[in-house]
Every structure is written in structure tokens, then in C-alpha cells.
Image (cartoon, rainbow, N blue to C red):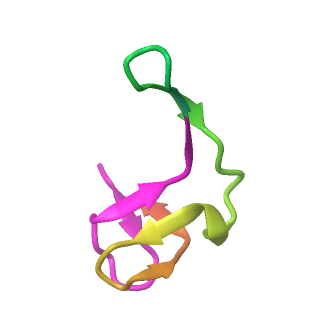
């Protein structure tokens, strides 16, 4: 199972996250509330909703 873009089904996607910059860039948790503005598809080059397939 992987997260995919709702527009093109690509797995080349990103989600907004909190990063602890003083802890060797360790990520803490996603800050997305499910809105498409928090996600990005590198293939469509647009904000998108994510599907878990």
C-alpha cells in the first residue's frame, strides 16, 4: 500500500510535515489535515488529494 495522487495515481507525492531542525532534521508528524493544499504531486506539479492504495 502506498499514497498516490488523486489526479494521476502517481506515487511521486509529498505531504507537509513538521521537522525538528535541531534534531538532525528528524520529522515529527504530518501537519496535513487532509486538505489538498497540504499535498503536492511532483508529476502533475499541482496540489492534490492523496489516496492510500
Residue closer to the observer: 45 or 51: 45
How far from the left and from the top, in percent, is residue 16?
55, 51
Numbered circles on residues, count: 0
Residue closer to the observer: 37 or 51: 37
How far from the left and from the top, in percent, is residue 38?
61, 61
How far from the left and from the top, in percent, is residue 51?
46, 64
Q: Is residue 44 magenta?
A: no
Q: Is residue 13 above or below residue 15?
A: below
Q: Which residues are magenta?
A: 1-18
Q: Residue furthest top?
A: 23
Q: State the residue at coordinates (43%, 84%).
A: 7
Q: Quadrant of residue 35?
A: bottom right
Q: Is residue 37 left or right of residue 47?
A: right
Q: Is residue 2 above or below residue 48?
A: above
Q: Is residue 52 above or below residue 47?
A: above
Q: State the residue at coordinates (55%, 71%).
A: 49
- Quadrant housing the C terminus: bottom left
Q: State the residue at coordinates (65%, 50%).
A: 32
Q: Is residue 3 magenta?
A: yes
Q: Quadrant of residue 31?
A: top right
Q: Is residue 52 left or right of residue 17?
A: left
Q: State the residue at coordinates (49%, 25%).
A: 21
Q: Is residue 20 above or below residue 7?
A: above
Amino acid at each position: 500500500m502506498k499514497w498516490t495522487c488523486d489526479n494521476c495515481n502517481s506515487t511521486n507525492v509529498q505531504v507537509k510535515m513538521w521537522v525538528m531542525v535541531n534534531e538532525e532534521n528528524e520529522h515529527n508528524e504530518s501537519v496535513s489535515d487532509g486538505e489538498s493544499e497540504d499535498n503536492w504531486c511532483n508529476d502533475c506539479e499541482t496540489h492534490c488529494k492523496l489516496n492510500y492504495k
